[in-house]
Amino acid sequence: MKFNLQANDPKSKARAGTITTAHGEIKTPIFMPVGTAGTVKAVHQKELKEDIKAQIILGNTYHLYLRPGLDILEPAGGLHKFMGWDKPILTDSGGYQVYSLSKVRKIKEEGVTFRSHIDGSKHLFTPEYAMDIQRTIGADIIMAFDECTPYPCDYKYAANSINMTHRWLKRCCHRVDTTPPKYGYEQTLFPIVQGSVYKDLRIKSAEFIASMERDGNAIGGLSVGEPAEEMYAMTEVVCDILPYDKPRYLMGVGTPINILENIALGVDMFDCVMPTRNARNGMLFTRNGIINITNKKWANDFSPIDSESDLLADQVYSKAYLRHLMHSKEILGAQIATLHNLHFYLWLVGQAREKIITGEFYEWKNKMVSILGTKL
């Protein structure tokens, strides 16, 4: 994997670059649609590529490990071939899902024992096994196995947690460095900075992660319920420490405003279920603000979903029609809304990239942030 920085915004820490992987180029800053179980919910791979213009998608190690399972994915030739996607894939390590299973998991030095949410079967994820699973899934970028701390989190717990995450990281690095990639292409490991909302712990973790000298780095444990100001403060501290010449990935973030503010702090990569999950509930993100398409005010609005968008679905279907589909619980409603939101997110980071290159990002970002949270 290679990362080339191409431009820096003169009034913020925003930057534009290109990540090159075996499955193609990724122009940063970038948003990665979440394909939890080998599918970005409600959209075809052709739509992902041609309409949404996704450059990389995210797969989930925990879910793919449980279903369809490695005994299906390996003979299929990995997730790319299994799902018919020929662009880059990033997999998370399963750490976040294990964190969210707090009632059915136990964390020890060896790893994490948990019970499947599907059938209650017992499993053990060690750092080594998490690397092996991601190798078998076949992602271009694989994530270190870490513990994602909750919010709020006791300082002592957070301190002990990052120490264990760092010990686990050494084991992840050793496993990746001493085992060959599968399917004939390189797989790149990103470590994850933790430390909850404690500045000294974030500094300690970021310094340790930077010292591991991997080809990219991630920031985890944010967007778990803390105020946005805390998220931005921790991101800024960490971005100032992580290597300038390597991509920075802020995990699980977030709203359009969150994304723009974190781009301004030096983040290059994002993922979040928000555009897809909210779409299925009728919330549309637009360049003029937020639309709840289920509201009665749209019942007789026969204007296009988004007349400024170049997405065919936004131009062909009206707000009234989409509202009708959502109220009728027609599957097409969820499909159109999901297409719209993901297209908007990719448009937004594409615009951010253009503005960074032309040196206009900071003013444009401030203008957009004042608009994007407006409820229409």
Image: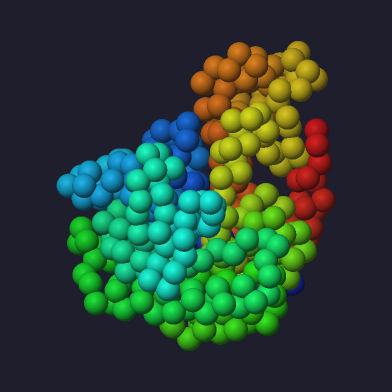
Within the image, what quadrant is residue 47 found in?
top left
The residue depicted at 69 percent of the width and 38 percent of the height is 286
The count of marks equals 0
Which one is in front, 15 or 180? 180
Q: Position of residue 109 (x, y in %)?
A: 42, 73
Query: Residue at position x 80%, y 20% from top?
Result: 297
- Residue 110 or 321: which is nearer the viewer? 110
Q: Is residue 123 above or below residue 328?
A: below
Residue shown at the point (76%, 59%) measured from the top left: 227
Residue at 49% from the left image edge and 74% from the top image edge: 165
User: What is the quadrant of the C terminus in the image?
Assistant: top right
Vertical order, 368 against 200 (above or below)? above
The x, y position of residue 126, in whole percent, is 36, 66
Residue 374 placed where, x, y %?
Answer: 81, 41
Of 68 and 39, nearer the camera is: 68
From this viewpoint, is residue 199 visible?
yes
Q: How is the image coloured?
A: rainbow
Pick the residue in front: 295 or 88.
Answer: 295
Residue 19 appears in the picture as rendered: no
Query: In the figure, is residue 129 to the left or right of 157?
Result: left
Quarter the N terminus occupies: bottom left
| Residue 57 horizontal side relative to residue 269, left or right | left
**Residue 136's image quarter?**
bottom left
Q: Position of residue 127 (x, y in %)?
A: 37, 68
